[in-house]
């Protein structure tokens, strides 16, 4: 057996890590850029001729402080008990013009970009930072000077202290230096003056690499926060949210979606000679799905989806083997039967269109299934962004048992309208 057939995690770790970081950065930067352009185009859409020359887009800059705690969702956090967390964010956001259709339809929506510096009580997590996109809108107006808002965030986080089999063998919470950041919150907006707002609320965020590198327990954080925002071009008149609903041009959408990704998995140490269940080997994942979605409203769609998947990790296993060529031992990954890498599932899919992005979720069950590592029941949740009237991009995460991440979904789709 040749040396090249082995996965030497001791001598090739550095090269693998560098390639992995470049790949992860490229994917996430491409995702953020592809999301940002359509968001900007939507928010900066033109209004009618009579008001276009007079109106300007409302914008703001803000400083946001968070002070919260990590949840004890894995053995490492339970053992250390060091759960304190804080962050400071600088943010820029903007909204559609007062008379734009989006502003009236989605109740004062806004979008923007933020940069956060994080601090954790446990020095093992290093000094991470996050670059993220956010969007939100009003839930309810309580008083003229106070309203309830929601917000969601998606971004790229780096510089994490993470698991290392020699230096941090117990840190199973964060498995890689780069992670995806997902967050959401509810808050009260207080209108202090024409130019100043004060936001008080609480949110939840999650850091994870989506099984891109093991271990991948992830970190879940609850964060009360305070934000002070300075506004530009703020309109004095509150937009009327009672508007004429747009005419539906179609009743059924036929979606064809292609997915490409990769994943890692845990390997058994029983009878394999492995010293650890974490072996740095990425398995290719390809997916193809067809969904028939009913369109009862411009705000949501739902319907069945047929999902095909090719997953190299299905029935793969690893052993510690002796290589007679150089007299050394290596961690060797063995792939399963090619036929048993395929699966087919049937899921129920729903989409909810918000101010700038569309959120989707699938709940499915594999009818054809050979992967003993994963359960048949699966879930997919993520965001969708329209690139053209028919072409769209999607980013999500597929999991099993509502808790175990399988892989990130980097997808491109096309809609046929009926």
Image: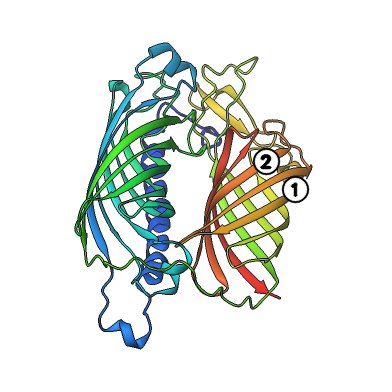
Task: Pick whichever of labels 2 and 1 is earlier in the sequence.
Answer: 1
Where does label 2 land, which residue? 378
Image position of 361 with respect to 258: above or below: above
Callout 2: SS: strand
Image position of 113 with respect to 205: above or below: below
Image position of 35 with respect to 20: above or below: below
Q: Residue at x 75, y 48 (%)?
A: 345
Toward which corner of the image does residue 298 lie, by quadrant?
bottom right
Residue 78's spot in the image, x, y percent? 45, 14
Q: Residue at x 70, y 37 (%)?
A: 336
Where does label 1 land, which residue? 345
Residue 284's spot in the image, x, y percent? 58, 46
Q: Nearer the viewer, residue 327 or 242?
A: 242
Q: Residue at x 56, y 19 (%)?
A: 274
Check contact, mark 2 vs mark 1: CB within 8 A.
Answer: yes
Residue 141 in view (yes/no): yes
Image position of 259 with respect to 315: above or below: below
Residue 1 in view (yes/no): no
Q: Residues within 10 Å of mark 1 (few under 14, many from 20)?
A: many
Image position of 54 (left or right of 12): left
Residue 277's spot in the image, x, y percent? 55, 22
Callout 1: SS: strand
Q: CA distance from mark 2 to mark 1?
A: 9 Å
């Amino acid at each position: 057996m040749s040396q090249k057939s082995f996965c030497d995690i001791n001598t090739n770790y550095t090269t693998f890590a560098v390639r992995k970081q470049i790949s992860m950065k490229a994917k996430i930067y491409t995702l953020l850029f592809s999301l940002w352009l359509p968001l900007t185009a939507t928010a900066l859409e033109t209004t009618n001729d009579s008001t276009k020359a007079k109106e300007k887009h409302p914008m703001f800059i803000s400083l946001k402080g968070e002070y919260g705690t990590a949840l004890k969702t894995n053995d490492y956090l339970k053992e250390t008990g060091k759960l304190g967390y804080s962050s400071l964010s600088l943010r820029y956001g903007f909204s559609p013009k007062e008379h734009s259709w989006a502003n009236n339809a989605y109740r004062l929506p806004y979008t923007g970009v933020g940069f956060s510096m994080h601090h954790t009580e446990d020095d093992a997590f290093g000094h991470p930072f996050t670059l993220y996109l956010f969007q939100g809108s009003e839930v309810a107006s309580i008083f003229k000077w106070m309203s309830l808002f929601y917000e969601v965030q998606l971004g790229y986080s780096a510089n994490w202290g993470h698991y290392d089999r020699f230096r941090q063998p117990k840190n199973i919470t964060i498995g890689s230096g780069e992670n995806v950041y997902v967050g959401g919150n509810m808050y009260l907006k207080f209108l202090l003056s024409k130019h100043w707002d004060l936001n008080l609320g609480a949110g939840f965020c999650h850091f994870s690499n989506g099984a891109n590198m093991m271990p991948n327990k992830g970190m879940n954080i609850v964060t009360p926060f305070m934000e002070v925002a300075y506004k530009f071009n703020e309109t004095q008149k509150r937009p009327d949210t009672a508007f004429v609903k747009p005419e539906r041009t179609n009743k059924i959408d036929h979606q064809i979606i292609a997915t490409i990704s990769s994943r890692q998995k845990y390997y058994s140490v029983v009878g394999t000679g492995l010293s650890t269940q974490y072996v740095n080997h990425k398995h290719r994942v390809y997916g193809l799905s067809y969904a028939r979605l009913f369109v009862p409203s411009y705000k949501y769609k739902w319907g069945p989806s047929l999902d095909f998947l090719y997953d190299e990790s299905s029935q793969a296993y690893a052993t510690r083997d002796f290589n007679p060529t150089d007299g050394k031992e290596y961690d060797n990954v063995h792939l399963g039967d090619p036929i048993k890498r395929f699966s087919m599932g049937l899921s129920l899919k729903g989409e909810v269109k918000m101010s700038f992005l569309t959120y989707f979720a699938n709940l499915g069950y594999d009818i054809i299934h050979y992967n003993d590592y994963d359960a048949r029941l699966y879930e997919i949740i993520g965001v969708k962004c329209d690139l053209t009237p028919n072409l769209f991009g999607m980013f999500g995460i597929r999991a099993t048992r509502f808790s175990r991440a399988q892989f990130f979904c980097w997808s491109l789709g096309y809609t046929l309208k009926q």
